[in-house]
Image (cartoon, helix red, strand yellow):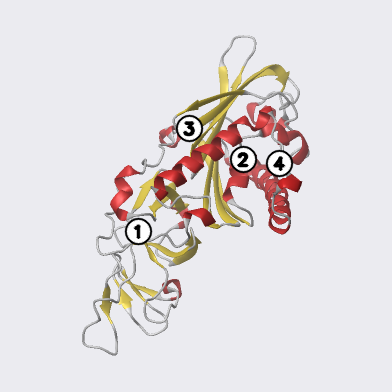
Amino acid sequence: MSASAPDPAASWYPPIATDQRNYPYNCWWVAGLSSQIGRKLLGRWLLDIPVLLYRKEDGSPVAIEDRCPHRAAPLSLGTLQGDDVQCGYHGFTFSSEGRCLRVPSMKSPPAAARVRSFPVIEQGPFIWIYMGDPDRIDDAPLPHVLEWTEDPSFAKVEGIMEIAANYMLLKENVLDLTHFGYVHASSFKITDWVDPPRFTTEGDTVSYHQSFSRSALPPVFAEPLGVATGTPYDRENYGSFISPALQIAAVDLIDPDNGTITGRFRVTHATTPIDTTHMLYFWIVARDFGTDPEQMAHIEAITKTGFAEDEAIIEAVQRVMTRDPRSNRTREISVKMDTAAVQARRIVQRWMDREKA
């Protein structure tokens, strides 16, 4: 794990005021999957800021502002010159630290011609970015380590989705798994999530844990495990809201006759706001059973189908909220199963309060 240093010359200010958003800037967010960042310039919006991602010739990742200070052209439309980026509009060239190196029409570039560079950490399957106050970077918890990424017995599939909804709608969705029997009835076919799990909160982490005893094993677990669908099996389901950027979920499959764990299933949900009503959703599914290429291709297809179902319902919720914002006449009702989601909202508010302070 390595991080680039903050840009000491950057004067930081939040692009969007704290009372107009529900996501903190002083936080490590996922900028991209490690597998998708290379020598090709990649531009995307993160937290209302245009960001350019690429790798230097030595393979290290770079994140700088995707906006030329000359006439606001996206630098992602330019070209790489070694480790430097040449703007495709008027040829201004910038280093990976954001300093302007060359202006074709001048002997030396103006000192003010620079773009902000962002600290990045490449860790496991993710490239993380810090876009907040450089003076407060040490106060932001470092990205959570996904222990299974170092375990060679796990195989994984991954993906990225752009969803037209506030990022917290996805976070609440994966904290309330009672939606499985309705939204995913024809994809994941997990129908026994009915009762609320056990909830625990420790600091800025909220977790859930649900035990299933001799419950009919759905095909998404049974088939790669090599047992008949519907076989009575024990499952331990648990997960945590780690930070505004990350949630994790796990399923341990246990033979009820001898208590042996026969399969471990892991899901990582990383959500990065594009703006208040759009997000990037980076997901990773991993398991240590049914790991041959054909079986992994099958779980990838099911996952994409299921997450598209989530996307449809979440975007529908966002449309209702946008056109008919919650007020006294449309009061939101929460139930016991919403405990983790309500705690997650409070945790995010604490992040926001610390940033405002």
Lower position in the chain sequence, tag 3 or tag 1: 1
Depth check, mark 4 against mark 2: the one in front is 4
Label 2 residue SS: helix
Q: Residue furthest bottom?
A: 105
Q: Position of residue 81 (x, y in %)?
A: 32, 73
Ranked by sequence position, the earlier of labels 4 and 2 is 2
What's the mark number on residue 332? 4
Q: Position of residue 255 (x, y in %)?
A: 62, 15
Distance in Å between CA atoms under marks 2 and 1: 29 Å
Q: Would you say 340 lies left or right of 183 here?
A: left
Q: Position of residue 105 (x, y in %)?
A: 29, 90
| Crowding at mark 3 (Cα within 10 Å: few <14, some 14-19, many 20+) | some
Which corner quadrant of the image does residue 239 belong to? top right
Q: Are marks 4 and 2 in contact (CB under 8 Å)?
A: no
**Could you say which disc has been placed on residue 172 in the image?**
2
Q: Identify the amino acid type marked 3.
A: Thr
Q: Residue furthest left?
A: 107
* Tag 1: amino acid: Phe
Q: Is there CB contact under 8 Å for labels 3 and 1?
A: no
> How many labels sit on residues?
4
Callout 2 amino acid: Glu
Instruction: Report the Cα–Cα distance between label 2 and label 3.
Output: 14 Å
Residue with the mark numbered 3: 205
